[in-house]
């Protein structure tokens, strides 16, 4: 049988209440704390985390809700969250909503994590969250922070999607392209609208007319990139010379379908993605993309949540991180020239 709190108290020459105060990091004289810690090491005593949580009202566990666990994008964010929590002595429970558009799944997951005594929850989502779905938790002052998405009622951390899209499209216009298509993400998603707005702004800033027929709807999945490429190929001679996809998975789908059709990237068409997931650098051709600082996003969001949990920064704030253009092989296409005009 392992050592008990009574054994520690006996060896240290103090009461069980004093040992409990040391374990829960309450105010104790330094000499007394040293005696208790020495006794704990001597007995190889490990405090029961559940019991410690009941005493302190804290579990040192943070819940993280993601749309999908296998997705490289969300995996990088979770890596950042884990690093931040490790640095501050917290643990993590991760649950997935299965990429559903139903915010009820996120609410149910947050409620479950609260019932499991998580100190707070980080909701990672590409969508805008309605505060109505989380009203019960908000009324109870349960700590909630959003990463990647947006909510008017919650603190959040996201990347500047407008800026990132502008950088991607400006890169293509600087190469001389005038006919640039965009494959968009989830319809209505805030970050998708921001990237579409950045695409349009960059075109118009270069004196290029925005054309609705060159905006092809997608949903961030690889297959939606394939479907978008099919539509663009069907345009025949009117096909664009460059394509900006709102994420890397769709960009890869676009490139692979173009390859099937005998259209070379970057020889015939330039392609730029968004996110810079891990496989973007190893894809062939290596993908030019907009890097979102995903690990940093996870770290910043986790630290923000912990500041709410610990009561050091309770107000609602929104933190915007910058995106970076990463130039690789897939955007190296020369613009098509006809009669001295770039098409």
Image (cartoon, rainbow, N blue to C red):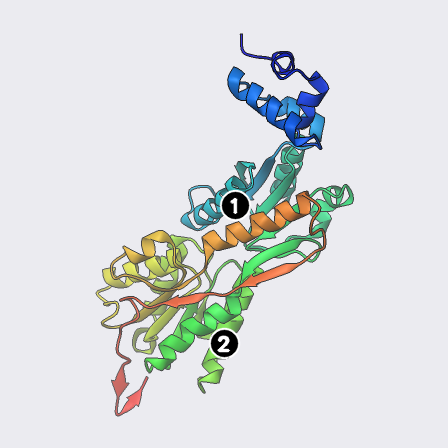
Which is in the foreground here, disc 1 or disc 2?
Answer: 1
* Nearest to the observer: residue 38 or residue 159: 38
Q: Is residue 234 left or right of residue 9?
A: left
* Other residues around mark 1 within 10 Å, as few (<14) / some (14–19) / many (≥20): many
Q: Position of residue 49 (x, y in %)?
A: 60, 25
For the point 56% across and 22% down, the residue is: 38
Helix, strand or loop for disc 2:
helix
Which residue, given by chain and number where applicable, does mark 2 sit on?
200
Q: Is residue 135 left or right of residue 270?
A: right
Residue 150 in which image quadrant: bottom right
Q: Position of residue 101 (x, y in %)?
A: 57, 48
Residue 187 in which image quadrant: bottom right
For the point 24% across and 60% down, the residue is: 260
Please tell me the numbered disc located at residue 25.
none
- Asked if the residue at tag 2 contacts the one at tag 1, i.e. Cβ–Cβ closer than 8 Å, the answer is no
Q: Is residue 58 above or below residue 291?
A: above
Quarter of the image containing the C terminus? bottom left
Helix, strand or loop for disc 1:
helix
Q: Is residue 86 above or below residue 128?
A: above
Q: Is residue 118 above or below residue 232?
A: above
For the point 62% across and 17% down, the residue is: 12
Question: Alpha carbon of mark 1 to alpha carbon of mark 2: how far?
Answer: 36 Å
The answer to whether residue 83 is visible is yes
* Number of disc labels: 2
Q: Is residue 205 left or right of residue 109?
A: left
Identify the residue at the far front of this view: 31
Which residue, given by chain and number where applicable, does mark 1 sit on?
84
* Nearest to the observer: residue 284 or residue 305: 305
Residue 23 in which image quadrant: top right
């Amino acid at each position: 049988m392992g050592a008990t709190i009574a054994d520690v108290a006996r060896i240290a020459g103090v009461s069980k209440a004093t040992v409990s105060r040391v374990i829960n990091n309450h105010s104790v004289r330094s000499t007394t704390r040293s005696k208790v810690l020495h006794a704990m090491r001597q007995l190889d005593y490990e405090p029961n985390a559940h019991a410690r949580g009941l005493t302190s009202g804290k579990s040192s566990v943070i819940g993280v809700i993601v749309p999908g666990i296998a997705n490289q994008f969300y995996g990088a964010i979770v890596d950042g969250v884990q690093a931040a929590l490790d640095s501050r002595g917290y643990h993590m429970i991760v649950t997935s909503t299965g990429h559903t558009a139903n915010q009820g799944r996120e609410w149910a997951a947050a409620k479950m994590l609260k019932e499991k005594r998580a100190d707070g929850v980080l909701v990672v989502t590409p969508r805008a969250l309605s505060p109505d779905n989380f009203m019960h938790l908000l009324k109870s002052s349960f700590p909630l922070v959003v990463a990647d998405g947006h909510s008017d009622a919650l603190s959040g951390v996201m990347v500047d999607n407008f800026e990132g899209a502008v950088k991607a499209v400006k890169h293509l216009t600087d190469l001389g392209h005038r006919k640039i298509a965009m494959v968009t993400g989830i319809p209505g998603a805030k970050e998708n609208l921001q990237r579409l707005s950045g695409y349009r702004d960059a075109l118009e800033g270069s004196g290029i007319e925005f054309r609705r027929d060159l905006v092809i709807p997608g949903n961030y999945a690889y297959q939606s990139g394939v479907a978008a490429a099919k539509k663009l190929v069907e345009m025949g001679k009117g096909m664009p010379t460059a394509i900006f996809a709102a994420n890397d998975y769709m960009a890869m789908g676009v490139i692979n379908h173009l390859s099937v059709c005998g259209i070379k990237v970057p020889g015939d068409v330039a392609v730029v993605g968004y996110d810079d997931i891990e496989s973007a650098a190893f894809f062939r051709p290596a993908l030019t993309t907009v890097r979102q600082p995903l690990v940093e996003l996870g770290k910043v969001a986790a630290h923000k949540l912990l500041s709410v949990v610990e009561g050091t920064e309770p107000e609602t704030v929104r933190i915007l991180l910058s995106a970076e253009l990463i130039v690789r092989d897939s955007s190296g296409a020369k613009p098509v020239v006809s009669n001295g005009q770039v098409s």
